[in-house]
Amino acid sequence: MDTNDQGLKALAGKLDVINATHVIHVFTLEDQREFIKHLMALLKREKGVMCTGRMAGHLLPGYKKGANVKATTKSGGDIWEHNEESFKKLWKSVGDEMGTKWDVKAWFWRFGLHSGLGREGWFREEEHGIVTFIATRL
């Protein structure tokens, strides 16, 4: 998220593919928008470049009490989780703002309730899952 980072500036417009696995959901919704702008800026400005990834998701998009989120977000412990449609809308909205068009495919993988594999603080009391996505520049 540091727009002044020299390493990232050196990569601007040079990448063909970015994999953003398990990172987007750790931001507030507004910061997710900014993060996606940064991802788009790192990619080449040509048809066919891609951003792929996966993130915590939910059948009903919105802020959710999450697993270990107090250590990973600025939101005080809530994370914005998408379903496939809300993520597609977010990416389209950012693309429109940036003057780019994207084909976004997304899939929701449902977990249900689980104990977090024994990790303290990772229990989820409501159904949730993972959103996997591929965004390809048109």
Image (cartoon, grey):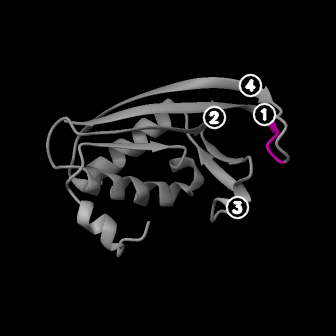
Which disc is residue 112 wearing? 4
Upstream in the sequence, badge 1 or badge 3?
A: 3
Which disc is residue 58 wearing? 2
| Left or right of 50, for residue 32 | right
Q: Nearer the viewer, mark 3 or mark 4?
A: 3
Specify the amino acid type for callout 4: Gly
Residue at horizontal 31%, vertical 73%?
A: 6
Q: Nearer the viewer, mark 4 or mark 2?
A: 4
Check whether the beta carbons of the residues at disc 1 and disc 4 lie within 8 A of each other.
no
Q: Report the front residue among 70 and 89.
A: 70
Specify the amino acid type for callout 3: Ala
Relative vertical location of residue 112 with respect to residue 80 in this rendering, above or below: above
Q: Which of marks 1 and 3 is in front?
A: 3
Local secondary structure at mark 1: strand
Alpha-carbon distance for marks 1 and 3? 21 Å
* Corner quadrant of residue 106: top left
Relative vertical location of residue 16 with respect to residue 77 in this rendering, above or below: above
Residue at horizontal 65%, vertical 62%?
A: 75
**Residue 77 seen in the figure:** no
- Residue 91 picture location, percent across and down: 37, 44
Local secondary structure at mark 3: helix
Specify the amino acid type for callout 1: Glu
Q: How many callouts does the rendering have? A: 4
- To which residue does mark 1 refer? 126
| Left or right of 17, for residue 114 | right
**From which residue to which does the magenta span run?**
121-126
- To which residue does mark 3 refer? 71
Specify the amino acid type for callout 2: His
Local secondary structure at mark 2: loop
Alpha-carbon distance for marks 3 and 2? 20 Å
Upstream in the sequence, badge 1 or badge 4?
A: 4
Check whether the beta carbons of the residues at disc 2 and disc 1 lie within 8 A of each other.
yes
